[in-house]
Image (cartoon, coloured by chain):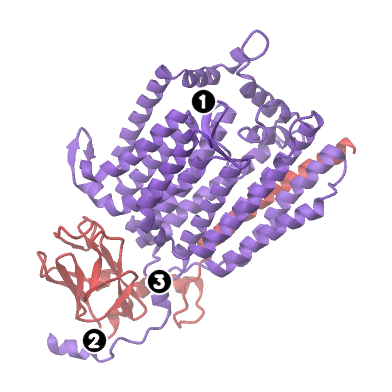
Chain colours: A purple, B red
Amino acid sequence: MSRTDAATGTGSGEFVHRRRRGAELFLLVVALLVGLGAYAAVGLGMEGEIPADMFTYGGGLTVMIVACHLVVRFVAPYADPVLLPVVAALNGLGLAVIHRLDLTYGEIGQKDDYAQQQLIWMALGVVLFLATLLLLRDHRTLQRFTYTSGLLAIVLLLLPLMPIIGTEINGARIWINVAGFSFQPGEVAKVLLVVTFAGYLVLHRDALALAGRRLLFVDLPRGRDLGPILAMWLVSLGILVFQRDLGSSLLFFGLFLVMLYVATERPGWLVVGGTLFAAGAFAGYQAFGHVRQRFDLWLDPFAFYGEGTNDLGRQSVETQFGMGWGGLIGRGFGNGRPELIPYANSDFIFAAIGEELGLTAVMAIIVCYGLIVERGLRTAVTCRDGFGKLAATGLAVTFALQVFVVVGGVTGLIPLTGLTTPFLSYGGSSLVANWVIVALLLRISDQARRPLPSMLSTEPDPEPDAEETQVVKL
Amino acid sequence: MSELTLFLIRFAYLAILWIFVLSAISVIRSDMFGARVPDTGRGRLGRKEKAARAPKATKGPSRRRGAPTHLLVVEGSNAGERAELADAPLLIGRGNDAAIRLDDDYASTRHARVAAFEDDWFVEDLGSTNGTYIGSARITQPTTITLGVQVRIGKTILELRK
C-alpha cells in the first residue's frame, strides 16, 4: 500500500494539495441549482407554476448546505472539494423526485408526506454530518473502537429481531419502530462494520498475508489471525439471512471481501470469495423460496405480469415500460406515470428518474456516484496511515456495491435485491448513515491531503552542533 | 403551459445536471494537475525549469557538506547493511521492495520510510505492527532525524551516517 503514496510523492513534500474550498463553494452553488431546479421543474410540470413554497424550501436547503460548507471550511480545510457538492446535488434531486411522487400520491388519495419526512431526515443527517466533523478531529481515533464498534454493529443488527421494537415489512424483518419512527439499524451497522474491518485488518494484515499454510493456490492464514473477523462476519451475515435481507447480505459480503483483498494484496481471496459467493447463491436458490422467486422474476418478469398470474413481476415490468417510455431525454416532470411502479420513491426511484428525466439524467447520476467512489478511493491512495486507507476504501466500496446492486436490480442486469439508492431514495436510516459516511470520508481526505505539519513548520534545528559531536564519534 | 415550454424546461434541467457533473470533473482535473509544488525559495519558475529541477529536489540535503550520505544498520541481524540516501525515499521492512531488507521478526513488510524534505531527513512509520522508535518514544508522525540518531525497528537499530 505504501508503494502508491511513494509514487504520488506525498511523503517527500513534492506534491501539496490545495485547499480548494472556493471550488467547493462554486460546485455547491451549482448543486443547489440542481436540487432547486428540479423542485421548480416539478412545480411547473405538475401544476403549471413555480411552487408557492419555493423560497422557504430553497432557503432551508441553502442554509443546510451553507452550514456544511462553513464547517468543512473551518474544521476540515483540506478535505476533498467534490464529495460534498455531489452529495448535495443527489440529495436535492432525490427530494424533488419524492415530492413529485407525493403530488401524484396525494391526487390518488395515498399517503403523501414522504418528501416532508425525507427533509426532516436530511436535516438530521446534516446535523450528524456536522457533529461527526466537529467531534472527530482525527479519523485514527476510530481505530481504538475496533471491537466496540463490531459489537455495536452486531447488537444493531439483532435489534429488529427483538419482540416489541422489531417490525416486519414486506417479508424482511430489518426495521425497528420506536415512538412512531421506523429505523433500519442495518444501515448504521454498515458504517460500524467498515470501522471494525479496517481496524482489525490494519493490525493483522501482515500476519494474514504472510503467516500460514498454502492450500491449492491460496495462502490460508492461521485460524487465530482470521478467526475473530470471520466469526464477526458470519454472525452479521447469519443475522441478515435470518432476516431475509438479501441486499445487505450481498453488500456486507462484498465489502468484507474487498477489504480483505486490499489489506493483504492477495488476489487469491477474490477467487475464494467468488467461489463462496457462487456456492452461497446456489445454496440460497435451492433452500429459500424467496431467493428462487427473485431469480425467476429476473429471468422472465413478463411471466409474472398481468391477469391470470400472481402479478409479482409488476414492479420490474412497469419499470421497464417506464424507462422505455422515458427514452433518451425523458417525459419531463409530471408527464410520466412513475406512480404505477410500486415503491417508486424508495427502491425504485431510479425507475422514476429514468421515466421522467430519461437516460441523460440516469447517466449523469451514475457518473455522480462514480465520482463519489473515485474520490473515496483517491483518498485511500493518498492517505498515509493504513487504517485511513482501509476505512476510505471500505466506505467507497460500500457506495459502489450499493449502487451496483440497486441500479443493476432496477434495470434488470442482476436479480432484484432490496437496497436503497444512496441519497436519492426515500428512507431515513439510509440517508442519515450515508451523510455520516460522507463526513468520515471528508475527515480522512482532510488528513490525507493536508501537508505534513512537522514538515511545514520550521522546527528549530535540533542541536546545531550535534553534527560535530557525531563527527568525533565516527 | 404549452408543450414547447415544458420541453424547454426539461431540456434546461438536463443541461444544469450535466453542467454540474462536468464542472465537478473539471475540479477533479485541476486538482490532479494543478497542485502546487511547495515554494522552497526558488521563486517562480517556468514549467520546464520546474520539471528539470524536480529530480534534484528529491536528493534533498545530500549535497550539503557534512550531510549524511547513507543509512546504516548498526545493530540486529542485518548489522552492517547500508542504503545510499541518494536513492531516497528509502523503504525499510521485511518486504522484497525495501531498500534495507530486514530479517527481523518484529519488523513489518513495509515498516518505515526515510525521506528528505528541504534540508532535513525524516523517518515515517508506515503503520507497522510493532512501531518505530526514536530513543524510547514510539513515533506517530514523520520525525526529523540527524546524524547518529538511533532509529529502532524491532531488534534492529538504524542510523544516518556520513
Q: What type is the residue that disc 1 sits on?
A: Pro
**Quadrant hosting residue A427:** top right
Q: Nearer the viewer, residue B29 or B48?
A: B29
Disc 2 to disc 1, C-alpha distance: 68 Å
Q: Amino acid at mark 3?
A: Gly
Is residue A80 something one can see in this rendering?
Answer: no
Name the residue nearer the viewer: A8 or A220: A220
The x and y percentages for residue B153 are 20, 66
Instruction: Say if mark 2 contacts mark 1, CB within 8 Å.
Output: no
Q: Residue at x 49, y 67 (%)?
A: A17
x and y, in percent, of residue A208 in the image: 25, 46
Q: Earlier in the sequence, mark 3 or mark 1?
A: 3
Q: According to the image, label 1 marks what residue? A: A415
Q: Which residue is mark 2?
A: B66
Q: Name the mark nearer the viewer: 3 or 2.
A: 3
Instruction: Give the spatial CA distance, label 3 vs label 1.
Output: 48 Å
Query: Picture quarter containing residue A56?
Result: bottom right
As helix, strand or loop, the secondary structure at mark 1 comes to loop
Q: Residue furthest right?
A: B1
List the single residue furthest toward the top: A308
A268 left or right of A96 in image: left
- On screen, residue A162 versus residue B142, left or right, reads right
Q: CA distance from mark 3 to mark 2?
A: 23 Å
**Residue marked by disc 3:** A13
Of tags 3 and 1, the one toward the viewer is 1
Where A289 sits versus B51, above or below? above
